[in-house]
Image: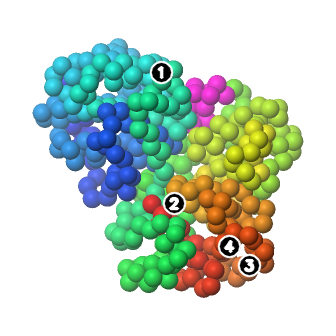
Amino acid sequence: MDILFARNQELLDHLPDGFVRSMMDDVLWDESRLIAIRGSRGVGKTTLMLQRQKAKYGSVANRKSLFVRLDSTYFTQHTLLETAERFYRQGGELLLVDEVQHYPFWSKEIKEIHDTYASLRVVFSGSSLLHILNAEADLSRRALSYDMQGLSYREYMQLYHRISLPKVSLEDILRHGTDICSEVARLCRPMEHFWHYLRKGYYPFGAEGFAAYDTRVENTVDLLLNIELPQLRKVDIANVRKLKSLLAVIATQVPMMVDIAKLSRMTGIARTTLLAYLQYLHEAKLIRLLYADELSVKKMQKPDKMLMENSNLVYALSLAEPNPGTVRETFFANQTGCRHQVEYSGQGDFRVDRRWLFEVGGKAKDGRQIARAKEEAFIAADDMDYPAGNKIPLWLFGLLY
């Protein structure tokens, strides 16, 4: 146990001060003895957990809290259950468990820990691919589950430029956009850093410099394709290179209607297998599948449209300079989809919460495509500082979290 506490303290000693993700306030840390945090590689799950530990306990000196990673060599010789028991008997109160997907029996042992030690709180995190609520052990009645995104544009501005922009709701943006833009204008020029965020701002890798940013994004993708998808979804290793090629196609092309037969021929992957793989890539937060009706049987067949999950993936994986329209749509779907239901719309680009219709484009975009919409219709337009009629600055949607 001593080595675990020593490693934990070293992580706390090197934890960056100052910036804390807004998700820290969203998690109901004291409402449940079991909390699950899922997210794609690199979005900051480990940092969030360590910040929570430091805020509550300061250090591990009193041995009331312990952070462990299940991909550590320590757990090749020791079990999580054994570790939790020793920690609890020494007075432990909070056990934080990272990278659970690397431990074969994580769900069964976490369930047993939860059921056995009534005063012990457990927070665990892992890949977005984890079926936390459908794992081998039924954790659905026990765990509060959260999904973690990468940085919003608002968080990017706070982390890298020390500018605290307001966090707003979608309703606020649509009803009070001019007031919000006026408040932001007193703090910064919102377009000054927006396109850098779209290129290199979603993952918090920039704290170590932006020079190798795209390489780190590619490495993250490679780990998902080569390790997590085969391990957690039984993807055939022989198809991994084909999947990376597929990602490059999606990143390079203008947002497209999905032609499964064509994609099957391009990748050499059978249609049924390809549909399953697309769903896995969606779960892994590498792409976003959009459906005209989330509740219809179409979801069991094929998506209506697909995008990369975030704009940084577009730039890192594209075979050519990305199409600006692709980048804009990817940003809108990513930021809005964190809090809202986003569906494909043939009349505009997106339908949100079955209430609003959005067309996404440049400053000169007109509203002809959404002119006869039954829903309230808006244009999310790039290169604007203030709303104009039903045109809303695209960057405003980066303030949603």
What residue type is disc 1 on?
Ala
Q: Point out the frontmost of discs 3 and 2.
A: 3
Q: Which of marks 4 and 3 is in front?
A: 4
Q: Name the residue under label 1.
A: 137
* Above or below, comparing residue 266 to residue 391 in the picture: above
**Residue 235, quarter of the rendered image:** top right
Tag 4, which secondary structure? strand
Residue at the disc numbered 4: 377
Residue 200 is labelled as 2
Q: Which of 239 and 398 is in front in this view?
A: 398
* Closer mark to the observer between disc 2 and disc 4: 4
The circle on residue 24 is none
14 or 234, which lies in front? Answer: 234
Tag 1: Cα neighbours inside 10 Å, few (<14), some, or many (≥20)? some
Which secondary structure dominates the residues rendered in magenta? Answer: helix
Where is residue 200? Give x, y as percent: 51, 60
Q: Is residue 350 above or below residue 251?
A: below
Q: Which residue type does callout 2 highlight?
A: Lys
Q: Is mark 2 on a helix, strand or loop?
A: helix
Q: Where is residue 369 in the image (x, y as percent from the top left)?
A: 78, 73
Nearest to the observer: residue 152 or residue 345: 345
The numbered mark, 1 or 3, whose residue comes first in the sequence reads: 1
**Disc 1 + disc 3, Cβ < 8 Å:** no
The magenta stretch is: 222-235
Q: Is residue 335 something one can see in this rendering?
A: yes
3D distance between C-alphas at marks 2 and 4: 30 Å
Residue at left offset 39%, top offset 26%: 70
Q: Quadrant of the N terminus?
A: top left
Report if the CB atoms under discs 4 and 3 are less than 8 Å apart.
yes
